[in-house]
Image (tube, rainbow, N blue to C red):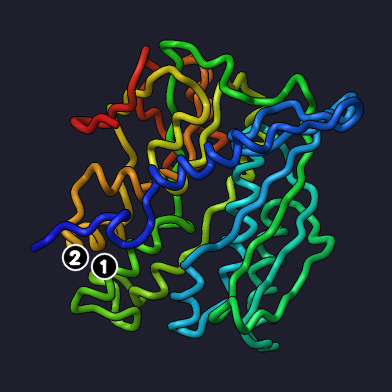
């Protein structure tokens, strides 16, 4: 049985990174004075200097997860994903979300679908204590097949509370925080695996109560606990684990990560791995594998960090000099 990979399914992470680098090389102009940038392009969120505080901005979308929503005609959770993918990047620099705008591009206007999408957007806004202040709906039949949902979030953070990873040092503790499933990443590979398997989205999840489609639509967890965490604990680094999996850790420090006690992935990950004959390294490069967020703190703050971040959060390893290692896997 051949091994399926993310790149073979149509998403080449390394090529994406090269594309981002190519754009960053051109986007060098910056504003001067009030509102000047505080961070370079490439961190989880951009920061603008507002004097006594910083304004943080992110933009992201749901991605090909919307194709599964279309397949099973269930759209009431993808709005949570849209907001989650944005606000989790704000949390990753210590910012608190305050406002959001959405962008819904459709092949054909469908009021019922739009109303279901709005249910998820409203729920995501509630979970992140944020207001949806506006948005845009565009009918683009020559470009869009079905629909695409994206958005932009803004947040605020005191400049002395910004978490950039600069304070991370060898010996710091890694705390892993559980995900709720695939969140909104790796779906090009996940869909390919199901399409080539004996299963459909309407089949029961083996050993579970939901169908496979419903399991794949489990919405992205919104890590609102981070707001309390950065207020009460000394936090050296924050990583939102999305597309490219553990490679996302490289965004916060050039130092290394040694994961000795990883979180247990949910059954959906094991099902996909078995059906697609996907090796362990590819799984951890593509999916969050049950861990949607990583917090880097001094060892003395680990216990309180686990308490604040909630059930399932635990110490998974520590900061080392170089590399990313999870058990026998090296990245």
Q: Residue shown at 60%/82% (left/top)?
A: 142
Q: Which of 177 and 195 is in front in this view?
A: 195
Secondary element at tag 1? helix
Asked if 273 appears above or below 26 in the picture, the reply is below
Residue 55 place in picture, x, y as percent: 80, 36
Q: Residue shown at 68%/71% (left/top)?
A: 104
Residue 189: image quadrant is bottom left
Secondary element at tag 2? helix
Q: Are marks 1 and 2 in contact (CB under 8 Å)?
A: yes
Residue 202 place in picture, x, y as percent: 34, 83
**Is residue 300 toward the left or the right of residue 116 in the image?**
left
Residue 158 place in picture, x, y as percent: 79, 27
Q: Mark 2 points at which residue?
A: 275
Q: Residue shown at 46%/19% (left/top)?
A: 254
Asked if 166 appears above or below 179 in the picture, the reply is above
Q: Mark 1 points at which residue?
A: 193
Task: Work out whether residue 181 can be spotted.
Answer: no
């Amino acid at each position: 049985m051949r091994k399926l990979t993310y790149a073979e399914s149509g998403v080449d992470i390394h090529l994406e990174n090269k594309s981002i680098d190519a754009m960053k090389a051109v986007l060098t102009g910056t504003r001067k004075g009030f509102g000047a940038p505080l961070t370079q392009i490439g961190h989880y969120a951009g920061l603008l200097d507002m004097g006594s505080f910083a304004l943080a901005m992110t933009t992201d979308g749901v991605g090909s997860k919307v194709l599964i929503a279309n397949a099973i005609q269930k759209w009431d959770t993808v709005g949570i994903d849209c907001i989650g993918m944005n606000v989790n990047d704000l949390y990753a620099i210590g910012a608190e979300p305050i406002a959001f705008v959405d962008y819904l591009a459709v092949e054909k206007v469908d009021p019922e679908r739009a109303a279901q999408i709005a249910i998820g957007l409203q729920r995501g806004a509630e979970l992140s204590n944020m207001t949806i202040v506006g948005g845009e709906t565009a009918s683009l039949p020559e470009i869009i097949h079905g629909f695409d949902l994206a958005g932009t979030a803004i947040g605020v953070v005191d400049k002395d509370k910004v978490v950039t990873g600069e304070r991370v040092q060898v010996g710091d503790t890694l705390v892993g925080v559980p995900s709720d499933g695939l969140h909104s990443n790796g779906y090009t590979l996940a869909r390919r695996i199901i399409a080539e398997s004996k299963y459909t989205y309407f089949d029961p999840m083996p050993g579970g109560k939901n169908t496979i489609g419903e399991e794949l639509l489990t919405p992205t967890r919104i890590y609102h606990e981070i707001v309390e965490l950065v207020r009460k604990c000394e936090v050296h680094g924050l990583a939102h684990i999305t597309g490219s999996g553990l490679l996302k850790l490289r965004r916060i420090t050039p130092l290394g990560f040694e994961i000795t006690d990883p979180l247990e992935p949910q059954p959906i990950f094991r099902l996909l791995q078995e059906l697609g004959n996907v090796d362990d390294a590819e799984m951890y490069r593509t999916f969050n594998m049950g861990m949607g967020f990583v917090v880097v703190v001094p060892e003395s703050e680990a216990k309180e960090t686990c308490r604040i971040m909630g059930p399932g959060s635990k110490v998974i390893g520590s900061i080392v000099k170089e590399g990313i290692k999870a058990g026998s896997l090296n990245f």
